[in-house]
Image: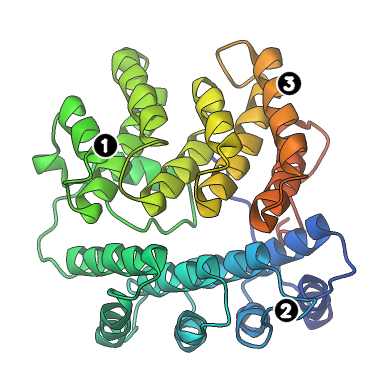
Amino acid sequence: MSAVAKPRAVSEEELRTWGARIRDPSAPLVERAHAMWGLRHAREPLATSLLAAYVTEVFPPEPASNALLQHEAAYCLGQRGDLSAVTDLEAALRDSRHEPIVRHEAAEGLAALASAPGVDVEHIKRVLTEFRDIDIVAVAETCEVGLGRIAWLQRPNKTPDPAAVLAEAEFPNTIDPSPAFDPDATPSMAELRRILLSPSSSLFARYQALFSLRNAAVVSTNDSTSSKHFSEVVEALSEALAAPGSALLRHEVAFILGQLSIAQTGDALIERLNDQQEAPMVRHEAAMALGEVAGSAEAGEGDCDANSLSVRARQALLAGCKDPEPVVRDSCALALDMADYVASNDRFQFAEVPTY
């Protein structure tokens, strides 16, 4: 289970230093990302304001603009649960100067904030509905999934889900874009796989199948009698990296594989990263997941040939650092840094996360 560190207070000076660093094009990308994650976890309201400023005041082709970092800033705003970010995320979603990956993350952030106490859920629904039919597919699909999540949140008498509770403990302080299927209506493992891989299923149902499989993997790693289910989950998720019909879904599959850090999925992630015909957002997420998987393999957390996998993964990420697509190139650089962190025994914490 993931440990939850105790948050500490962060001074205004330190927060503003981080805020300046994320906007400094002369700073190394890794340092800018570390500062971003410091702001992500800082409890002070100023952290929200500094993240918001980066997505509402900086646009291409300004030197400070960076699609990967600004998409991460939008993600952080959604995950922080601060209602003041609703206006800023809406502004980022509406602004066509932003790259589609940034606008997608702004939409997802709005949907994440829909579960925050005191939020104007109806306003968020109106905004997501407005953009559900936009001609940018990833943004439109994000709004579709977000509206599905809100409809689920508003359903009365939801059945408690022990697997979801276990997953929340495993991945603390993370708001999923979709729930799993209700425990009293969860399809079989074979049916979950069928739904996930079927472009004829609704996108929200495919997301629910994905998170049901994610939760099943978490349960399996905590229950030695569930090894068969674990193998089935690994096979389904690896296959879903190439699932037809939605790049958004494939990018979420890669994100979940990064969460789970399953060594057996490393080669499928390498294949997705190397596919020049794949959408950049999918290749980006495959790179980030590969960093987690490679680091876990090097740390001895995997159960396959860790050395061989880590070599292949690092070779793919190093090659990706020269990719012509900026968001892929930048993701590979950050993924190598993450792999170093996960594999290391002497780093206190990743990035400038404000914890004791």
Q: Count residues near mark 2 (Cα–Cα under 10 Å), then give few for <14, some for 14-19, many for 20+.
A: few
Question: Which residue matches tag 1?
Answer: 197
Q: Which mark is residue 61?
A: 2
Picture residue at 62% right of the left edge, 41% below the top: 287
Above or below for 57 versus 339:
below
Could you tell me which secondary element the residue under label 3 belongs to?
A: helix
Q: Amino acid at mark 3?
A: Val
Q: Can residue 333 be seen in the rendering of this structure? A: yes
Could you tell me which secondary element the residue under label 1 belongs to?
A: helix
Residue farthest front in this picture: 277
Above or below for 319 versus 125:
above
Question: Which residue matches tag 3?
Answer: 311
Picture residue at 10% right of the left edge, 66% below the top: 156
Spatial distance from mark 1 to mark 2, Cα to Cα? 38 Å
Q: Position of residue 308 (x, y in %)?
A: 68, 14
Residue farthest right in this picture: 26
Left or right of 199, for residue 259: right
Choose mark 3 or mark 2, whichever is in front. Answer: 2
Left or right of 186, for residue 284: right
Between discs 1 and 3, the one toward the N terminus: 1
Which image quadrant is residue 121 in?
bottom left
Spatial distance from mark 1 to mark 3, Cα to Cα? 30 Å
Q: Can residue 299 be seen in the rendering of this structure? A: no
Which image quadrant is residue 211 in?
top left
Could you tell me which secondary element the residue under label 2 belongs to?
A: loop
Above or below for 311 versus 143:
above
